[in-house]
Amino acid sequence: MSAIPPRPDDLHPVGASPVPTGDAPTWGIGQALLAYIAAFAAAAVVSVPIFALFGSSDTVAVAVNAVVAIVIAGALVWWLAVRHPGWRTSVGLRAAAPLRDLAAGLAFGAVVYPVVAIAVASTLGFLLQRLSGGSVKTPDQVPSDLPPLGIAFVVVYALVIAPAGEEFFFRGVLFSAARARLGLWPGALFSGLLFGLIHYVPAPWPDAVLLMAVMVPTGMAFAWIRARRASLYASIGAHVAFNVIGLVLIYATR
């Protein structure tokens, strides 16, 4: 009696986008979120003496944001190293050609920015304007009138620390776990929603919602390039390019 081979779609259901066994994370979505919350709490504790020593100027606030991001990333690395050996492959840090992936991500991010800024932001802005009855714009994420040291902190944070730190968690740790359990696009949406939430800025509610809403498809796009290239370097590159364009436009229009 001959065995009938399984259909290809039985092995890999369409749309499931399974993660290769060797790349699947050994942590779950809940574990990733709890680890992030614990890391954020540790970073908050570290930030208190910095504000106490140096005050709460805009320059200090930018510097503290950088410190917080570094502490969070360091705490997550410690957690992964202790509890999840082999984590580098799962988060996408063992890519075969990291520089090529980084370059591909830079090109992709340069395309994502105008799509998000023109198509997505304008549509959402129009809808929020109709709902609120007033003008709507994305709130300023970079303080104005910073001294040269503050501007230097902003550049380093926006182009190095934030892309590396945010991509490490949202596309490396969280999206990897969500994709393994939910599939590519549900995982991208889940991580994108949380990515949008962390971009809350105190502002009138339509402005704050606009910024957070725009970051959701942005995060999903970063998740796609991370999955497409099987490399965290690709989403880091996309994030860097996105922030470069945004930062240039911010200072060019002031």
Image (tube, rainbow, N blue to C red):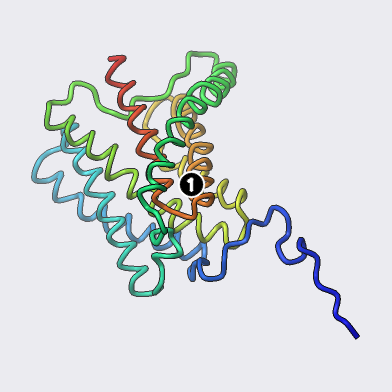
On the image, numbered disc 1 is attached to which residue?
194
In the picture, the quarter occupied by the C terminus is top left
Residue 5 rendering spot, x and y as whole percentages: 81, 73
Query: Residue 36: which quarter of the image?
Result: bottom left
Query: Residue 131: which quarter of the image?
Result: top right
**Which of the two residues, 236 or 149, is positioned nearer the viewer here?**
236
Q: Tell me: residue 62, above or below residue 17.
A: above
Residue 243 rendering spot, x and y as whole percentages: 35, 33
Residue drawn at point x = 46 percent, y = 65 percent: 31
**Which of the two residues, 23 or 42, is positioned nearer the viewer here?**
23
Q: Residue furthest right?
A: 1
Q: How many marks?
A: 1
Left or right of residue 99: residue 23: right
Residue drawn at point x = 34 percent, y = 68 percent: 79
Q: Tell me: residue 8, above or below residue 225.
A: below
**Which of the two residues, 16 or 99, is positioned nearer the viewer here?**
99
Residue 191 rendering spot, x and y as whole percentages: 51, 49
Residue drawn at point x = 30 percent, y = 67 percent: 78
Left or right of residue 16: residue 140: left
Residue type indicated by callout 1: Leu
**Which of the two residues, 51 or 140, is positioned nearer the viewer here?**
140
| SS for callout 1 | helix
Residue 97 rendering spot, x and y as whole percentages: 39, 54
In the picture, the quarter occupied by the N terminus is bottom right
Left or right of residue 9: residue 64: left
The crowd level at tag 1 (other Cα within 10 Å; few <14, some 14-19, many 20+) is some
